[in-house]
Image (spheres, rainbow, N blue to C red):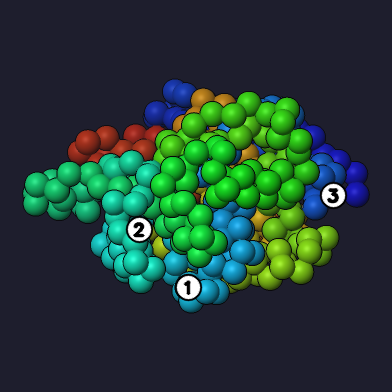
Amino acid sequence: MSTKHHDPLVIECSRGPAIESTHLVDAAIVDASGKLVEGWGDVERMVYPRSAVKSIQVLPFLESGAADETQATDAEIALACASHNGQEAQVKAVREWLTRIDLGEEHLECGGHLPYHTESAAECIRQGDAGLPVYNMCSGKHSAFLVTAKMLGEETRNYIDREHPVQQRVSAAIAEMTGWDISRSPWAIDGCSIPTIGLPLHALARGAANIADASAQPPSRQAAITRICAAIAAEPFMIAGDGRACTDIISAIGDKAFIKFGAEGVFFAPLLSLGLGLALKVRDGATRAADTAIATLLYSLGLLGGATEEKLAGYLSTTLANWRGTPIGTVRAVLDG
């Protein structure tokens, strides 16, 4: 299979007949060995995956036996991989999960904010409810970290620290799945306070490919990956929520692939039906461009067809409206063929 390489994917934002803004997107599709199948722009660029790699970060939760020991449900595993809206059902699930293992919201070290979901945030404000850690988009992942530490007899405090065994296992999983020597990487602190490790875009895509094609992974990891993929397919609402690209696209395409957004315009997508991995980064970090880019690339790969394409038309070409609701333009991708 020959490698195809293109200029950066261009996302155009129009107003009336003119292009008002453009966003450039770098993207890579690779196989599990790391071979580049198709690329757009700079596939070597170093990116912080942010929350896009949660499905890798939670592998130790399953591989350690913590998920089995605590009888983790599909909803909880999906929440562990999620950047959730903070909607009522999601918050309730996190609270019940923590309660079941004799932990509480006070043990979460992700920091608090109002729900990302507008209506849920408004309800919190009406009730005088300050932003709580359980509303944090990453509270599911942090719950998985806490469960793992507790089940392994480790200190649950400071589980966010780079030196803590929880984060040591997470960073090892990232290195193993991406095939990248993370000692060469820049390290920083993510919005939820855990380390985020810089990776070349092609290495990030390889991490997705090793989920889509786990045949080279040890049996325990294959089993963990299978369970993660099944949980996300079964509980797409938990991965993000209403009005979010991750939930809408996963709900539409089923077990063909799953996608996970990361802050600053990152997407991570194991293409399960193709055995390949896709990663992208919008150069200016714009979410509107990232949503359009991931939908467009999935469409170009034949994963959004027929009724699925109709359901997701709003991501392939997003209508822009003014405050009166008058359509004034679109956000769409320009493929160079």
Numbered disc total: 3
Residue pictured at 76% horizontal, 69% vertical = 219
Residue pictured at 90% horizontal, 44% vertical = 2
Q: Nearer the viewer, mark 1 or mark 3?
A: 1
Q: Quadrant of residue 109?
A: top left
Residue pictured at 34% horizontal, 66% vertical = 102
Tell me if label 2 and label 1 are in contact, CB under 8 Å. Answer: no
Q: Is 84 left or right of 271, judged from the image as shown?
A: left
Disc on the earlier residue, 2 or 1? 1
Q: Nearer the viewer, mark 2 or mark 1?
A: 1
Q: Is 289 left or right of 336, judged from the image as shown?
A: left
Q: Is 313 left or right of 180, judged from the image as shown?
A: left
The percent coordinates of residue 328 (x first, y second) are 34, 34
The percent coordinates of residue 59 (x first, y second) are 61, 58
Q: Amino acid at mark 3?
A: Ser
The percent coordinates of residue 188 (x first, y second) are 54, 29
The foreground one among 246 and 178 is 178
Q: Which residue is tagged 3? A: 33
Q: Which residue is tagged 1? A: 70
Q: Which residue is tagged 2? A: 242
Q: Residues within 10 Å of mark 1 (few under 14, many from 20)?
A: some
**Quadrant the C terminus occupies:** top right
Secondary structure under tag 1 reads loop
Residue pictured at 48% horizontal, 76% vertical = 71
Residue 159 at least partly seen: yes
